Each structure stands twice: as structure tokens, then as C-alpha cells.
């Protein structure tokens, strides 16, 4: 399995540490305000966990050490792109990096966020 | 009838050329309505149906299985059975399950080949010894058994372990004598046969495609073989929990991940217990056929494919050879994967759901085989009485929200770390 790190390009999956599904943004800490329980429950624990295209956090631990969000299919393991995690939840995020095959439509279509 | 496979029957069949055997269970058409529907014909679904009939007298029950009985994780695991857990919420439950294993073949009239050959968790540092001592004491307090072994104990009990490994020297191990392994298929088949004989309909090739809810109460399910009504529906679908839960509009605390297992060529007896490597996640035992059966941790990425990737294969082989160097001379036969229902604290959920009449049995991570009889026992009680037995009081669905988690490893809320 090869992962297209937006910073380093296509790298073998052994260089990465997966963290799980990126389905909800991390809630704001909110200073001294009472934490938003349901938002944290949603972020930390609850998942749609689809058997389909999805988004997962990976850490490029043996590479540039960036946190990225990889677009993968959980039935075929096909990787269709990746985004820097810092950009993933932004409304105007930059385009997804595709896989090696420049003609692959996947890179463009990797539907972003939720 | 309980002696269908007993000595006299075997002798009689032997004399008449084995012409009298009948299928071990019926293949019924689904009825329009049942008292209870169980979704999933794995170990847990079948055990639940069996104990619903046996313990609670509820026999108008259907088990709906989308494939064939025992084709899921119950037929894909490394069959380790133990109750060496640390937290009360787990050890109470797994000890109940282990006690059921001890009488299971007799109870089912079917040899599940439970073999209490002991498990030894090997440790490699002073701090790991302290942690395992604490675990052993905790087990004893909850009625399980535990013995602390020193280095020489490991040399004696498992001579193939590389005790003097310079990188990971062995300090000793925590042994549970009553733990062991069992024959996975026989467990599924034994429960299936027992449930069928008590009147439960086991319906294969029947995929649940919808869960009907009216005014917050379950009224039935949709399947590829038509709608079936029931006021009580139990989900026991392991790796597919999120997908089936979604049919009822539930968003559950589960991620699906792949776990691989491996078996070697058949060998003469070389390992008589189950042993686990404390410097990496790795466990190994020898099957009755002689193959070494072993596994390690998840591949790590989310997956519904029942297969893993080569980097994990390499990692497992490295752990095998560091722990038991003799394995380097052994040829591997096959490897496979199963889809695990990973919970955020690594412990299972057996609870009601916010929907009346819909019950959840999930979050087994890689430990659900040993749980099979206990899970069926407790889940059937929950479904029959709408209240948990004391073994599963902490295995609540809302524990992640309330913070009363059962985090056996202390790894935090990340599904793939458990
Ligand atoms: C490689 C591997 C090694 C393991 N090793 C161990 C071990 O050593 N010790 C241990 O205790 N545990 C182990 N486990 C874990 C254990 O196997 C599982 O936790 C346990 O089997 C799960 O419960 P089950 O038997 O009911 O699941 P399954 O057998 O997976 O049953 C679930 C069933 O639900 C069915 N289903 C799904 N969706 C639907 C639907 N929509 N409609 C109808 N049916 C549906 C599936 O087809 C499946 O048959 C291991 C697992 C794996 C994969
Ligand atoms: Zn990188």
C-alpha cells in the first residue's frame, strides 16, 4: 500500500502510523467554559465507519512527520488521495494530492470532508 | 438425543457404513414473526439463541445470518480462551465465560475440544513484572487463577522461548493454568445444533437490510428473504456493527479494523501452552493438528476487507523469531484476516440501545472468541429480562460519554490502539 504524502510524495505505508477515522473536527477547547460533551463524544468515540470511501488520519512518522488525512476505500484498500490534516477541516482547503497515476480521476474526485 | 455423536451411535454407524447421519440442524424458511430475532450467526449470535432457549425458555427465535454459520470471525480466530484481565468490568465477565467453557462440551453434547493447556504472558522488565503481579492479584480477587513464574519457570514451562535474548531478556511470566484453546468451528456448530434442537430457526443466506422502528420501538427487520416481525432484536454482527446499527439510525463507538492470523505446517508437539511475547504484541500456540497458530496486532488502518498487508506479516514473523527462534526453521502454510469491531477502550458493549427492543452486542476487538459462551449467557439474559447480569453491568454503551470506560491497556480513546 502506497500513500501519497502531500509533502513527500508516494511513500510505502510502513512509514506511516494510522490513527483512525477523521469524521468530525476536534472541538474547540473553549478556555474555562464547560467542555461541549456531545461534540467531544462525537469526535472521540462515535463513527459512521463505512465500508466505502473514507478519510483517515495518518502520521508520516518515518518521513516528514506531518499529520495527513488519507482518502481510502475500506473494502478495496485503494488509496485515492491525501490532504494535510491542518487543512482538512478548512472550508477553502487546497486540492488533494493524488496517487502516482496523474490521469487517475480519483485525485480530483476524492470528495472532501463531510 | 444429546448423545447423537456418542460412542454407541458412532459404533452403530461404523457398522452400517455411516449411512444414518442426518444434517446437524434444519434449514427452515423464515416465519413471518418471532419473539426474538438475533442478527448474526457467529459464535455470539448462536450462543445467545442457545441460552435464550435453554435458560429462559424463549424458543420462538430466529438467527439471521447473511452468509453461512460460522463464516465470520468465529471461524477465523486463533482460539485463545482465558480470563486474565485486570479491570473488574472485564475479569468478572471473562471468568464467567471461562467457567462456562469448562463444562461446555458436556452441556452441548458436542466436543468443542476445549483444551485448558494454560497461557503464560511473558514479561521482560521489572515494571512489567509489577504490572503482571497486580493483574494476577486482581484475577485472584475475582475468582480466577494466576501464578507468577520466574525466569526458571519460563525455561521449564516453555523451553523454546529465548529466555536469554540480549535485547528482551525474559524476567518471568504470569500463568493462568485454566486458560487454553478450543476448536473454533466446533463451538459454532455445537451452539447451532443445541439451539436448533430447542426450536430456534437458524436462517442462513439471510442478510438484514433494514431495521423497522415505530415510535422508538423495534417492530421487525427487512431481509433479502422478506420482512420478518419481532419486538425484540439483538445485534451480534461483530465487524459489521456500524453498518447494521446504521440501519436503525444509530451512530456507534466502533471502528472496523483488520487482524491477521497465521498457521504453519504441521509439526510434532513442541509447544504445549499458549505463550505471549511481552516486548511486542505476539501470541503463539500449537493446534491439535500440529500447526503453530499465531498472531499479533492489527494492521492499523480501517478495513472491511478480510485480508491484511505484507508489512504486518513481516512484523509478525520478526516477533515470532525474536521470541521463539526455532520458528525461523518452520514453513508457513497460510495467513488470513478478519474484521474486528474495535471499541474506543478495547472492551465490549452488551447493552440496550436508545431504541426500545433493540439490543447491542459489539466491541469485541480481538478477544471475542473466549467470550462466546459468556456473551451468549449474558446477552440472552439482557434480552429476556431487560436487565443486565452483574457480569456485564459495566459494559454499557454510554460509558464513553460518562467516562466510566474499561480501558484495559490504559491506551486512551483511540480504537486501533487496543
Ligand atoms: C485473526 C483473528 C484472531 C482472533 N483471535 C482471537 C483469540 O485468540 N481469542 C479470542 O478470544 N478472540 C479472538 N478473535 C476475536 C473473535 O474471533 C471475535 O471477537 C468473535 O468471533 C466475534 O464474535 P462472533 O463470533 O459472533 O463474530 P462473527 O463470527 O464474525 O459473527 C458475526 C456474523 O454476523 C453476520 N452478519 C453481518 N452483517 C449481517 C447482516 N446485515 N445480516 C445478517 N448477518 C450479518 C456475519 O456474516 C457473521 O457471520 C480473533 C479474531 C480474528 C479475526
Ligand atoms: Zn511526508
Image (tube, coloured by chain):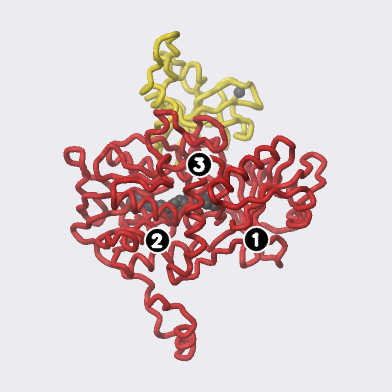
- Seen in the picture, residue B62 relative to B134 is either above or below; the reply is below
How packed mark 1 is, by other alpha carbons closer than 10 Å (few <14, some 14-19, many 20 or more), is: many
The residue that appears at 20% across and 38% down in the rendered structure is: B216
* Colour for chain B in the figure: red
Horizontal placement of B218 versus B327: left or right?
left
In whole angstroms, how far apart are the C-alphas of marks 3 and 2?
A: 32 Å
The residue that appears at 56% across and 53% down in the rendered structure is: B82
The verdict on a common chain for dots 1 and 3 is yes
Mark 2 CB lies closer than 8 A to ligand 1: yes
- Seen in the picture, residue B231 relative to B407 is either above or below; the reply is below
- Callout 1–callout 3 Cβ contact below 8 Å: no
Secondary structure found at label 3: helix
Number of marks drawn:
3
The verdict on a common chain for dots 2 and 1 is yes
Q: What's the chain of the residue with tag 3?
A: B
List the residue tagged with mark 3: B88
Say whether residue B172 is visible.
yes
Question: Looking at the picture, how far across and down is residue B354, in whole percent?
Answer: 28, 37
Foreground: B157 or A76?
Answer: B157
Chain-order first, disc 3 or disc 2: 2
Foreground: A2 or B253?
Answer: B253
List the residue tagged with mark 2: B69
Frontmost of labels 3 and 2 is: 3
Question: Looking at the picture, how far across and down is residue B369, in whole percent?
Answer: 49, 53
Horizontal placement of B103 versus B326: left or right?
left
List the residue tagged with mark 1: B286
The image quadrant where one finds the N terminus of chain B is bottom left
Q: Which chain is yellow?
A: A
Which mark is drawn over residue B318? Answer: none
Q: What's the chain of the residue with tag 1?
A: B
Amino acid at each position: 500500500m502506497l500513500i501519497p504524502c502531500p509533502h513527500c510524495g508516494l511513500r510505502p505505508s510502513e512509514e506511516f502510523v494510522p490513527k483512525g477515522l477523521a469524521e468530525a473536527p476536534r472541538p474547540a477547547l473553549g478556555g474555562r467554559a464547560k467542555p461541549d460533551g456531545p461534540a467531544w463524544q462525537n469526535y472521540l468515540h462515535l463513527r459512521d465507519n463505512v465500508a466505502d470511501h473514507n478519510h483517515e488520519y495518518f502520521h508520516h512518522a518515518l518521513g516528514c512527520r506531518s499529520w495527513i488525512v488519507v482518502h481510502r476505500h475500506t473494502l478495496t484498500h485503494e488509496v485515492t488521495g491525501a490532504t494535510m490534516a491542518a487543512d482538512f477541516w478548512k472550508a477553502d482547503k487546497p486540492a488533494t494530492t493524488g496517487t502516482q497515476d496523474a490521469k487517475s480521476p480519483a485525485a480530483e474526485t476524492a470528495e472532501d470532508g463531510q | 438425543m444429546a448423545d447423537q455423536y456418542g460412542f454407541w451411535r458412532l459404533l452403530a454407524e461404523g457398522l452400517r457404513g455411516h449411512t444414518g447421519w442426518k444434517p446437524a440442524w434444519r434449514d427452515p424458511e423464515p416465519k413471518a414473526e418471532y419473539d426474538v430475532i438475533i442478527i448474526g450467526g457467529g459464535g455470539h449470535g448462536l450462543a445467545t439463541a442457545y441460552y435464550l432457549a435453554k435458560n429462559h425458555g424463549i424458543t420462538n427465535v430466529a438467527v439471521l445470518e447473511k452468509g453461512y454459520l460460522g463464516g465470520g470471525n468465529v471461524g477465523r480466530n486463533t482460539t485463545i480462551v482465558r480470563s486474565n484481565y485486570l479491570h473488574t468490568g472485564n475479569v468478572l465477565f471473562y471468568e464467567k465465560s471461562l467457567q462456562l467453557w469448562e463444562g461446555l462440551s458436556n452441556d452441548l453434547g458436542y466436543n468443542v475440544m476445549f483444551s485448558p493447556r494454560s497461557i503464560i504472558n511473558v514479561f521482560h522488565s521489572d515494571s512489567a513484572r509489577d504490572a503482571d503481579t497486580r493483574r494476577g492479584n486482581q484475577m485472584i480477587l475475582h475468582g480466577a487463577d494466576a501464578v507468577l513464574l520466574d525466569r526458571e519457570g519460563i525455561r521449564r514451562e516453555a523451553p523454546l522461548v529465548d529466555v536469554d535474548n540480549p535485547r528482551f531478556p525474559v524476567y518471568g511470566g504470569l500463568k493462568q493454568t485454566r486458560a487454553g484453546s478450543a476448536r473454533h468451528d466446533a463451538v459454532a456448530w455445537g451452539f447451532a445444533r443445541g439451539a436448533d434442537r430447542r426450536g430456534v430457526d437458524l436462517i442462513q443466506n439471510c442478510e438484514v437490510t433494514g431495521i423497522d422502528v415505530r415510535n422508538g420501538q423495534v417492530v421487525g427487520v427487512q431481509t433479502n428473504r422478506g420482512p420478518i416481525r419481532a419486538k425484540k432484536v439483538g445485534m451480534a454482527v461483530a465487524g459489521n456493527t456500524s453498518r447494521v446499527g446504521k440501519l436503525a439510525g444509530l451512530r456507534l463507538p466502533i471502528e472496523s479494523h483488520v487482524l491477521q492470523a497465521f498457521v504453519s505446517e504441521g509439526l510434532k508437539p513442541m509447544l504445549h501452552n499458549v505463550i505471549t511475547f511481552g516486548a511486542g504484541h505476539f501470541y503463539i500456540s500449537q493446534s491439535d493438528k500440529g500447526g503453530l497458530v499465531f498472531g499479533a496486532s492489527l494492521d492499523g488502518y480501517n478495513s472491511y476487507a478480510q485480508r491484511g498487508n505484507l508489512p504486518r506479516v513481516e512484523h509478525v514473523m520478526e516477533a515470532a523469531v525474536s521470541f521463539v527462534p526455532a520458528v525461523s526453521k518452520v514453513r508457513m502454510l497460510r495467513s488470513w484476516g478478519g474484521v474486528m469491531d474495535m471499541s474506543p477502550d478495547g472492551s465490549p458493549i452488551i447493552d440496550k440501545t436508545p431504541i426500545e427492543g433493540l439490543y447491542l452486542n459489539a466491541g469485541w476487538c480481538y478477544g471475542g472468541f473466549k467470550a462466546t459462551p459468556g456473551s451468549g449467557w449474558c446477552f440472552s439474559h439482557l434480552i429476556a429480562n431487560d436487565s443486565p447480569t452483574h457480569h456485564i453491568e459495566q459494559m454499557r454503551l454510554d460509558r464513553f460519554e460518562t467516562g466510566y470506560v474499561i480501558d484495559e491497556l490504559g491506551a486512551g480513546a483511540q480504537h486501533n490502539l487496543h
